[in-house]
Image: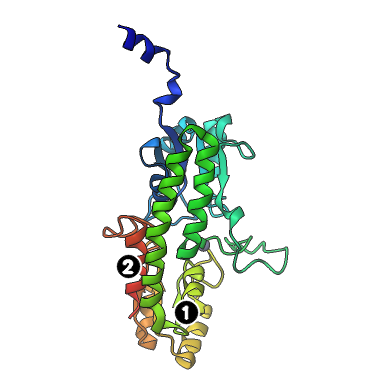
Amino acid sequence: MYRLLVLLLLPLSMFAELKIAVTYPYIGALVKEIAKDNANTYVLAKGNWDPHFVVPRPSLIAKVRRAEGLIINGGELEIGWLPPLIRRASNSRIAKGTSGYLDLSVYIEFLEKPTRLDRADGDVHPQGNPHYHLDPNNILILANVIREFLISLDAENKTAYDKNFQTFKNMWSLKIKEWDEKMKDKKGMKVVQYHNNLAYFNKAYSLNNIGTIEPLPGIPPSSRHTLELINTMKTQKPSAILHDVYHSTKTAQFISSKTGVPIVIMPHDIESLDEIEDLVSLFDYLTSAIK
Ligand SMILES: [Zn+2]
Protein backbone atom coordinates (compact mmCIF):
# COMPACT_ATOMS: atom_id res chain seq x y z
CA MET A 1 0.00 0.00 0.00
CA TYR A 2 2.79 2.37 1.02
CA ARG A 3 4.63 1.64 -2.23
CA LEU A 4 1.56 2.34 -4.26
CA LEU A 5 1.13 5.65 -2.48
CA VAL A 6 4.73 6.61 -3.24
CA LEU A 7 4.18 5.72 -6.89
CA LEU A 8 1.04 7.83 -7.01
CA LEU A 9 2.82 10.80 -5.50
CA LEU A 10 5.74 10.74 -7.91
CA PRO A 11 5.45 13.39 -10.61
CA LEU A 12 4.07 12.05 -13.86
CA SER A 13 7.02 13.41 -15.78
CA MET A 14 9.26 10.77 -14.22
CA PHE A 15 7.49 8.08 -16.23
CA ALA A 16 6.59 9.96 -19.34
CA GLU A 17 8.81 9.73 -22.38
CA LEU A 18 9.40 12.95 -24.24
CA LYS A 19 7.27 13.27 -27.35
CA ILE A 20 9.48 14.59 -30.12
CA ALA A 21 8.22 15.29 -33.64
CA VAL A 22 10.89 15.53 -36.34
CA THR A 23 10.54 16.33 -40.02
CA TYR A 24 12.76 13.64 -41.60
CA PRO A 25 13.83 10.06 -40.80
CA TYR A 26 17.52 10.98 -40.38
CA ILE A 27 16.59 13.36 -37.54
CA GLY A 28 14.39 10.70 -35.96
CA ALA A 29 17.29 8.26 -36.04
CA LEU A 30 19.56 10.78 -34.28
CA VAL A 31 16.96 11.43 -31.58
CA LYS A 32 16.68 7.66 -31.01
CA GLU A 33 20.46 7.36 -30.74
CA ILE A 34 20.71 10.08 -28.11
CA ALA A 35 17.43 9.56 -26.22
CA LYS A 36 17.00 5.77 -26.47
CA ASP A 37 13.92 4.97 -24.32
CA ASN A 38 13.55 8.50 -22.99
CA ALA A 39 11.73 9.77 -26.06
CA ASN A 40 9.00 8.78 -28.44
CA THR A 41 9.85 10.03 -31.90
CA TYR A 42 7.29 10.92 -34.56
CA VAL A 43 8.75 11.30 -38.04
CA LEU A 44 6.60 13.45 -40.34
CA ALA A 45 8.06 12.81 -43.83
CA LYS A 46 8.73 9.39 -45.33
CA GLY A 47 12.28 8.67 -46.44
CA ASN A 48 11.34 7.97 -50.06
CA TRP A 49 9.46 11.26 -50.50
CA ASP A 50 10.87 14.42 -52.02
CA PRO A 51 11.87 16.28 -48.84
CA HIS A 52 10.86 19.59 -50.44
CA PHE A 53 7.32 18.48 -51.20
CA VAL A 54 5.50 16.64 -48.41
CA VAL A 55 1.71 16.48 -48.36
CA PRO A 56 0.58 17.94 -45.00
CA ARG A 57 -1.98 15.20 -44.22
CA PRO A 58 -4.22 15.36 -41.12
CA SER A 59 -2.37 12.45 -39.46
CA LEU A 60 0.74 14.65 -39.47
CA ILE A 61 -1.12 17.48 -37.74
CA ALA A 62 -1.93 15.11 -34.85
CA LYS A 63 1.75 14.23 -34.49
CA VAL A 64 2.72 17.90 -34.26
CA ARG A 65 -0.15 18.59 -31.85
CA ARG A 66 1.04 15.93 -29.37
CA ALA A 67 4.70 16.92 -29.50
CA GLU A 68 6.69 18.45 -26.65
CA GLY A 69 9.59 19.13 -28.98
CA LEU A 70 9.88 19.72 -32.73
CA ILE A 71 13.16 19.32 -34.61
CA ILE A 72 13.43 20.51 -38.19
CA ASN A 73 16.12 20.44 -40.90
CA GLY A 74 15.54 24.14 -41.67
CA GLY A 75 17.18 26.14 -44.44
CA GLU A 76 13.71 26.31 -46.04
CA LEU A 77 13.66 22.59 -46.84
CA GLU A 78 10.28 22.35 -45.07
CA ILE A 79 9.00 25.77 -46.15
CA GLY A 80 6.44 24.33 -48.58
CA TRP A 81 4.72 21.99 -46.12
CA LEU A 82 5.57 22.46 -42.44
CA PRO A 83 4.23 25.98 -41.68
CA PRO A 84 0.57 24.99 -42.41
CA LEU A 85 0.99 21.85 -40.24
CA ILE A 86 2.33 23.92 -37.33
CA ARG A 87 -0.48 26.46 -37.72
CA ARG A 88 -3.19 23.82 -37.73
CA ALA A 89 -1.66 21.88 -34.82
CA SER A 90 -1.80 25.07 -32.65
CA ASN A 91 0.66 23.64 -30.13
CA SER A 92 2.38 26.46 -28.24
CA ARG A 93 5.03 24.08 -26.83
CA ILE A 94 6.71 23.75 -30.23
CA ALA A 95 6.14 27.25 -31.62
CA LYS A 96 9.10 28.88 -33.38
CA GLY A 97 11.27 30.69 -30.87
CA THR A 98 10.20 28.55 -27.90
CA SER A 99 12.43 26.04 -26.09
CA GLY A 100 10.50 23.21 -27.79
CA TYR A 101 11.56 24.25 -31.30
CA LEU A 102 14.90 23.28 -32.78
CA ASP A 103 16.08 24.33 -36.25
CA LEU A 104 19.22 22.28 -36.95
CA SER A 105 20.31 24.38 -39.93
CA VAL A 106 21.32 27.20 -37.59
CA TYR A 107 24.35 25.14 -36.57
CA ILE A 108 25.58 24.35 -40.09
CA GLU A 109 27.74 26.31 -42.50
CA PHE A 110 25.68 26.34 -45.72
CA LEU A 111 26.96 25.69 -49.22
CA GLU A 112 25.67 27.62 -52.25
CA LYS A 113 24.55 30.64 -50.26
CA PRO A 114 22.75 33.03 -52.61
CA THR A 115 24.84 35.78 -54.10
CA ARG A 116 21.83 37.91 -55.00
CA LEU A 117 18.70 38.61 -53.00
CA ASP A 118 16.16 38.19 -55.77
CA ARG A 119 15.76 34.51 -56.52
CA ALA A 120 12.09 34.68 -57.47
CA ASP A 121 12.57 32.12 -60.24
CA GLY A 122 11.17 29.07 -58.47
CA ASP A 123 14.49 27.99 -56.99
CA VAL A 124 13.77 25.80 -53.95
CA HIS A 125 17.16 26.55 -52.35
CA PRO A 126 16.74 30.29 -51.70
CA GLN A 127 18.99 30.27 -48.59
CA GLY A 128 21.62 27.94 -49.99
CA ASN A 129 21.69 24.16 -50.21
CA PRO A 130 19.72 22.61 -47.30
CA HIS A 131 20.79 18.95 -47.83
CA TYR A 132 23.64 19.24 -45.34
CA HIS A 133 22.98 15.97 -43.49
CA LEU A 134 24.65 14.01 -46.30
CA ASP A 135 28.08 15.06 -45.03
CA PRO A 136 28.77 12.50 -42.28
CA ASN A 137 30.85 15.10 -40.40
CA ASN A 138 27.72 17.24 -40.05
CA ILE A 139 25.88 14.31 -38.46
CA LEU A 140 28.16 14.61 -35.41
CA ILE A 141 27.39 18.33 -35.09
CA LEU A 142 23.66 17.56 -35.27
CA ALA A 143 23.90 14.75 -32.71
CA ASN A 144 25.50 17.15 -30.24
CA VAL A 145 22.86 19.84 -30.86
CA ILE A 146 20.12 17.25 -30.32
CA ARG A 147 21.81 16.12 -27.08
CA GLU A 148 21.68 19.71 -25.79
CA PHE A 149 18.06 20.10 -26.92
CA LEU A 150 16.95 16.92 -25.14
CA ILE A 151 18.74 18.00 -21.94
CA SER A 152 17.02 21.40 -22.10
CA LEU A 153 13.64 19.65 -22.23
CA ASP A 154 14.47 16.89 -19.77
CA ALA A 155 17.38 17.79 -17.48
CA GLU A 156 16.67 14.81 -15.19
CA ASN A 157 18.03 12.44 -17.82
CA LYS A 158 21.14 14.48 -18.70
CA THR A 159 23.51 11.64 -17.75
CA ALA A 160 21.79 9.24 -20.14
CA TYR A 161 21.80 11.76 -23.02
CA ASP A 162 25.49 12.53 -22.47
CA LYS A 163 26.40 8.86 -22.32
CA ASN A 164 24.37 7.91 -25.41
CA PHE A 165 25.89 10.82 -27.33
CA GLN A 166 29.40 9.68 -26.42
CA THR A 167 28.66 6.10 -27.52
CA PHE A 168 27.26 7.37 -30.81
CA LYS A 169 30.19 9.74 -31.33
CA ASN A 170 32.74 6.96 -30.81
CA MET A 171 30.96 4.63 -33.23
CA TRP A 172 30.36 7.36 -35.85
CA SER A 173 33.96 8.63 -35.74
CA LEU A 174 35.21 5.14 -36.59
CA LYS A 175 32.70 4.90 -39.44
CA ILE A 176 33.83 8.29 -40.80
CA LYS A 177 37.39 6.92 -41.03
CA GLU A 178 36.10 3.81 -42.81
CA TRP A 179 34.08 5.89 -45.30
CA ASP A 180 37.02 8.27 -45.90
CA GLU A 181 39.17 5.24 -46.71
CA LYS A 182 36.54 3.80 -49.08
CA MET A 183 36.13 7.11 -50.94
CA LYS A 184 39.84 7.98 -51.10
CA ASP A 185 40.30 6.94 -54.72
CA LYS A 186 37.16 8.87 -55.81
CA LYS A 187 38.73 12.29 -55.20
CA GLY A 188 38.21 14.62 -58.14
CA MET A 189 35.74 12.26 -59.82
CA LYS A 190 33.27 14.18 -61.97
CA VAL A 191 29.56 13.54 -61.48
CA VAL A 192 26.21 14.90 -62.62
CA GLN A 193 23.07 14.90 -60.48
CA TYR A 194 19.34 15.26 -61.03
CA HIS A 195 18.91 17.58 -58.01
CA ASN A 196 21.85 18.78 -55.97
CA ASN A 197 21.03 16.53 -52.99
CA LEU A 198 24.65 15.50 -52.67
CA ALA A 199 26.38 18.89 -52.50
CA TYR A 200 27.71 18.18 -48.98
CA PHE A 201 28.51 14.53 -49.68
CA ASN A 202 30.42 15.58 -52.79
CA LYS A 203 32.34 18.21 -50.86
CA ALA A 204 33.16 15.76 -48.04
CA TYR A 205 34.70 13.33 -50.53
CA SER A 206 35.98 15.85 -53.10
CA LEU A 207 33.66 14.72 -55.89
CA ASN A 208 33.21 17.32 -58.60
CA ASN A 209 29.58 18.00 -59.56
CA ILE A 210 29.67 19.40 -63.10
CA GLY A 211 25.93 19.90 -63.59
CA THR A 212 22.38 19.05 -62.66
CA ILE A 213 19.56 17.75 -64.84
CA GLU A 214 17.31 20.36 -63.22
CA PRO A 215 18.08 23.78 -64.74
CA LEU A 216 17.60 25.25 -61.22
CA PRO A 217 16.80 23.51 -57.90
CA GLY A 218 13.15 22.41 -58.05
CA ILE A 219 12.67 23.30 -61.75
CA PRO A 220 11.92 20.29 -64.02
CA PRO A 221 14.28 19.49 -66.90
CA SER A 222 13.89 21.51 -70.12
CA SER A 223 15.04 20.26 -73.53
CA ARG A 224 17.40 23.20 -73.98
CA HIS A 225 19.12 22.61 -70.63
CA THR A 226 19.24 18.84 -71.24
CA LEU A 227 21.00 19.31 -74.59
CA GLU A 228 23.48 21.75 -73.03
CA LEU A 229 24.18 19.24 -70.25
CA ILE A 230 24.73 16.44 -72.77
CA ASN A 231 27.30 18.64 -74.57
CA THR A 232 29.04 19.47 -71.28
CA MET A 233 29.13 15.79 -70.38
CA LYS A 234 30.57 14.79 -73.76
CA THR A 235 33.47 17.20 -73.18
CA GLN A 236 34.00 16.68 -69.47
CA LYS A 237 33.27 12.93 -69.30
CA PRO A 238 31.78 12.52 -65.81
CA SER A 239 31.75 9.03 -64.24
CA ALA A 240 28.12 8.88 -63.12
CA ILE A 241 24.70 10.49 -63.13
CA LEU A 242 23.76 10.47 -59.44
CA HIS A 243 19.99 10.26 -59.09
CA ASP A 244 17.57 10.52 -56.16
CA VAL A 245 14.89 7.88 -55.56
CA TYR A 246 11.80 10.09 -55.96
CA HIS A 247 12.19 11.81 -59.34
CA SER A 248 11.54 9.94 -62.58
CA THR A 249 14.78 8.75 -64.20
CA LYS A 250 13.33 9.36 -67.69
CA THR A 251 15.55 12.37 -68.54
CA ALA A 252 18.56 10.73 -66.89
CA GLN A 253 18.03 7.64 -69.04
CA PHE A 254 17.88 9.79 -72.16
CA ILE A 255 21.10 11.59 -71.16
CA SER A 256 22.72 8.27 -70.29
CA SER A 257 21.80 6.85 -73.70
CA LYS A 258 23.40 9.86 -75.44
CA THR A 259 26.57 9.96 -73.35
CA GLY A 260 27.13 6.42 -72.10
CA VAL A 261 27.39 7.72 -68.53
CA PRO A 262 25.69 5.31 -66.09
CA ILE A 263 22.91 6.29 -63.66
CA VAL A 264 23.61 5.57 -59.99
CA ILE A 265 20.70 5.77 -57.54
CA MET A 266 21.74 7.62 -54.38
CA PRO A 267 19.36 7.42 -51.41
CA HIS A 268 19.02 10.69 -49.48
CA ASP A 269 17.54 9.40 -46.24
CA ILE A 270 16.72 6.33 -44.18
CA GLU A 271 14.03 4.13 -45.82
CA SER A 272 14.44 5.80 -49.20
CA LEU A 273 15.43 2.31 -50.33
CA ASP A 274 14.37 -0.89 -48.52
CA GLU A 275 17.89 -1.74 -47.41
CA ILE A 276 18.58 1.69 -45.86
CA GLU A 277 17.45 1.02 -42.30
CA ASP A 278 19.58 3.45 -40.31
CA LEU A 279 22.17 6.21 -40.60
CA VAL A 280 25.08 3.80 -40.86
CA SER A 281 23.51 1.83 -43.71
CA LEU A 282 22.69 5.12 -45.50
CA PHE A 283 26.36 6.15 -45.61
CA ASP A 284 27.57 2.56 -46.13
CA TYR A 285 25.37 2.53 -49.23
CA LEU A 286 26.35 6.00 -50.49
CA THR A 287 30.07 5.28 -50.13
CA SER A 288 29.69 1.97 -51.99
CA ALA A 289 27.34 3.07 -54.78
CA ILE A 290 29.78 4.94 -57.01
CA LYS A 291 32.10 2.53 -58.78
ZN1 LIG B 1 16.88 20.47 -52.56
Q: Secondary structure at mark 1?
A: loop
Can you give x and y, in whole percent of width and height, for residue 194 in the image? 45, 71
The residue that appears at 37% across and 84% down in the rendered structure is: 261
Q: Which residue is mark 1?
A: 207
- Badge number at residue 30: none
Is residue 244 something that shows in the picture? no
The residue that appears at 37% across and 65% down in the rendered structure is: 175
Can you give x and y, in whole percent of width and height, for residue 65 in the image? 49, 31
Q: Is residue 68 above or below residue 216?
A: above
CA gap, disc 2 and disc 1: 16 Å
Is residue 234 something that shows in the picture? yes
Kindly identify the amino acid type of the residue bearing the numbered disc 2. Tyr
Can you give x and y, in whole percent of width and height, for residue 68 in the image? 50, 33
> Sequence order check: which comes first, mark 2 or mark 1?
1
Kindly identify the amino acid type of the residue bearing the numbered disc 1. Leu
Where the N terminus falls, by quadrant?
Answer: top left
The residue that appears at 36% across and 71% down in the rendered structure is: 178
Is 124 displayed left or right of 191 in the figure?
A: right
Q: Is residue 4 above or below residue 100?
A: above
Q: Which residue is mark 2?
A: 285
Where the C terminus falls, by quadrant?
Answer: bottom left
Q: Is residue 185 above or below residue 109?
A: below
Residue at the top extreme, as displayed: 1
Decide: few, some or many residues near mark 2? Use Cα within 10 Å; few <14, some 14-19, many ≥20: some
How many labels sit on residues? 2
